[in-house]
Amino acid sequence: MRPSHPPQVAALAAARDADARRLALLGGSLLVVGTLWGTVAFGEAHEEVTTSYGYTNFGELKYPADFEHLDYVNPDAPKGGEIAVWTQGTFDSFNNYARQGVAASLSTIGSEAILTSTADDPYGLYCYLCTTLEYPDDLSWIVFNLRDDVTFANGTPMTAEDVAFSYNIFIEQGIAEYRNVAEGFVESVEVEGPHRIKFIFQDDAPRRDRVSFAGGTPVFSKTWFEEGGIRLDESTEEPFMATGQYVLDSFDYNRQIIYRSNPDYWGADVPFNVGRGNFESIRVEYFADSSAAFEAFKAGEYTFRIENSSRQWATGYDFPALDNGWAVTEELFDGTVGTRQAFVFNLDREQWQDESVRRAVELMFNFEWSNRTLFYDLYARPESYWSNTDLAASGTPSEAELAILQPLVDEGLLDAEILTAEAVMPPVNDPEENAPSRGVFRAAAALLEDAGYAIGDDGYYAKDGQTLEVVFLQVSPQFDRIVNPYIENLERLGIKGVLERVDFAQYVERRRSGDFDLTNHGFDMGFEPGTGLEQWYASKTADDSSRNVMRLRNEAVDRILPLIVQAETLEELNTSTQALDRVLRSIGFDVPQWFNDQHWVAYYDMYRHPENMPPLTLGHLDFWWYDADRAAELRAAGAFQ
């Protein structure tokens, strides 16, 4: 996985906005190309140089150089129409790369990178803004031969100078968590011609991540940045000038954004784009909370909804638009790595640095009762950070895992128990009632007492005169019904629980600054983990990271991460990732909530999707299309506004 600057060219498994970004780059790093197509030449130093159209670390690329369109699209999909979606919160900027301001939804929709990926090839990267790439056997450098027909949205041509500028501005002005990971990859970037650029890698740059790192940076217009005095680390009133299909059409702060297809888009006929980017416009409606948004959907104020509430999905979809056949619901398989939704502890706070205290708090969350009573048995509980894949640790460590874990135990970085114990699993509670069993209460009380806490006269556990209190930082009222029963159990045990709901801007800032006890977080991992894991779990990113929200600093984890980055075979990758998963679960810095392997979608019956949906993305803003005849019928019937 290349270092993934949040919201930079997203992983296919990224959340809500990921599949809206044109030609999103998979969160994986790629190494040597297969033998599908390529030529070998000799460089100046008589080194062998391969020229090809793509890379893959494992196996061969799915698509040949001369493919006509992606397998999962409808190449005859009509163009036109509008799709309208919703989001929660506010926005005051279109720069998704800065700490300053709250970025607008889909603000990177117009960004493209040199390389691209597909939703049915988890390991492949392909030339997109380039025609070919060149590299020597030792991968000490990579040359991209850029297309000469790429233009920015304002019609100006893209050149190698723009690519070099874009890379450098991320290194110079990117957020700290990105720079902490990215620095040290590239020794220099050389513009060798108007459409030829060379990245020379540092000797210790992770080999498996080199090409995807160089090819994954979004490309912006150098002239536009310089003439406008634009900085990457400051908020902006419009998206950056890029090469993608969609451009900003209009907006009303905190209410609405409309993106429109550029009629002069350079890439309309590129094979990767056949059957994609079918909507004329994409409208985003903003709402203060999900309840208001749902009522607006029922009234036809927007037309496509991804449902993330099990209660809503189970009980809410019974309204006139559905009864009339104007709107439909659908469940579509999600084949990405299962997102581990969780409450995460702020490990910078002293009380949460004790694993016993964290485990006691975890025991009080009754998932089984919540799933039956609140979630209608629609969720599963994530056992791993790589649920539903062979990257997840299971049972006791294999011999290969032991080879990784034993030295860490010998150095005192891990407890010896990890060598013989089964991978940590979430606690199991009684589904019949929220209150955990007496045995669970006793176990939690013993953990607190082992940590030096004692029950005070007020009925709460305290240590050194400080009452043990858990404040849940939340932004959505939708979570009240989940947090409040959890708080009831904490109170029963003798831990003071508080639900603190704040507005979206405060929520973003307090998570950034570490002003919370527990907050929600989603761990979105990829099929080919690599350097990007440092943004999630490395000690050096703990002080300033949108991914390492829990502020994890653990030397054993830091020692395992390079093994994943350096893995050269699938077997090595699986083993090292399983070891990391096992260690992360043993630390217990979160309370796993749930995950869902289905996309729950509802939409007004004027949108269509291919029958052969790809496993790695929903693609509703990408390769779905608009049925104009059906839309006219619905509009005439008054189905939507």
Image (cartoon, rainbow, N blue to C red):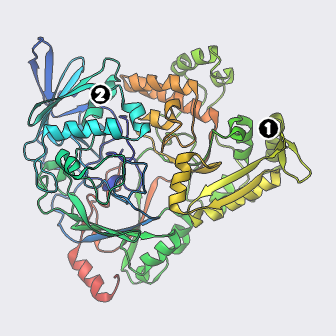
Of 251 and 207, the residue lying toward us: 251
Q: Quadrant of residue 357?
A: top right
Residue 325, above or below 583: below
Q: Which numbered circle lies on residue 210?
A: 2
Whole-percent x, y for residue 443 in the image: 80, 41
Across the whole image, how many numbered discs are drawn on residues?
Answer: 2
Q: Amino acid at mark 1?
A: Leu
Q: Residue at x 34, y 81 (%)?
A: 640
The quadrant in which the N terminus is found is top left
Residue 174, above or below 487: above
The quadrant in which the C terminus is found is bottom left
Q: Amino acid at mark 2?
A: Arg
Instruction: List the residue tagged with mark 1.
Output: 447
Q: Residue at x 26, y 30 (%)?
A: 211
Q: Is residue 96 left or right of residue 388?
A: left
Closer mark to the observer between disc 1 and disc 2: 2
Secondary structure of the residue carrying numbered label 1: helix
| Badge 1 or badge 2: first in the primary sequence | 2
Whole-percent x, y for residue 243 in the image: 19, 51
Crowd tier of the residue under label 2, counting other residues whose Cα lies within 10 Å: few below 14, some 14–19, many 20 or above: many
Whole-percent x, y for residue 613 in the image: 31, 55
Secondary structure of the residue carrying numbered label 2: helix
Q: Residue at x 55, y 72 (%)?
A: 315
Q: Is residue 506 left or right of residue 640?
A: right
Give the Cα distance between marks 1 and 2.
45 Å
Crowd tier of the residue under label 1, counting other residues whose Cα lies within 10 Å: few below 14, some 14–19, many 20 or above: many
